[in-house]
Amino acid sequence: MEGKIAVVAIIVEDKSAVEKINAILHDFSEYVIGRMGLPYKERNLSVISVVIDAPQEIISSLSGKLGMINGVKSKVLTTK
């Protein structure tokens, strides 16, 4: 099955969640094309964007796992 290109936007409001986020992203690393993280010290949060190439069910799984972490918000934008 051919994958879709997706951008996963992650906002980290609780820095203690970073290890969990990194563990999840590591589990999905075979689908990751690139990743960029930006600390925003003035607001005491971080913004991470991850570009992936994966089947829809993998994209949904990644988003769901990230969404279950306290202090983390994520949204996904995918190609058709």
Image (cartoon, rainbow, N blue to C red):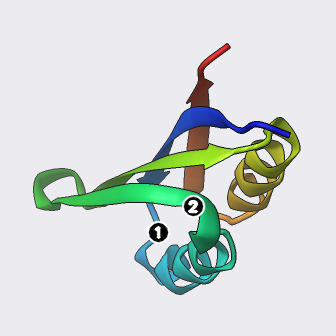
Q: Residues within 10 Å of mark 1 (few under 14, many from 20)?
A: some
- Residue identified by numbered label 2: 71
Question: Could you say whether the residue bearing mark 2 is in a helix, strand or loop?
Answer: loop
Q: Which is nearer the eye, 38 or 14?
A: 38
Amino acid at circle 2: Gly
- Residue 61 at what x, y percent from top left? 83, 53
Q: Label 2 crowding class (10 Å Cα cut-off): few <14, some 14-19, many 20+? A: some
Could you say which quadrant of the image residue 77 lies in? Answer: top right
Looking at the image, which residue is at 76% across and 36% down? Answer: 2
Residue 14: image tag: 1
**Which of these two is toward me, 3 or 17?**
3
Residue 27 percent coordinates (x, y): 69, 78
Which residue lies at the image location 66% right of the left edge and 74% below the top edge?
24
Locate the N terminus and report the quarter of the image it occupies.
top right
Residue at the outermost left position: 42
The label on residue 43 is: none
Q: CA distance from mark 1 to mark 2?
A: 5 Å
Q: Is residue 29 above or below residue 43?
A: below
Residue 29 percent location from the top left of the image: 58, 72
Quadrant of the frame with the C terminus: top right
Instruction: First in sequence, mark 1 or 2: give its number.
Output: 1
Residue 6 lies, with reference to residue 49, above or below; the image says above
Count of marks, rendered view: 2
Tell me the amino acid under the disc marked 1.
Answer: Asp
Q: Which residue is at the front of the view, 54 or 70?
A: 54
Q: Are marks 1 and 2 in contact (CB under 8 Å)?
A: yes
Q: Is residue 67 left or right of residue 25?
A: right
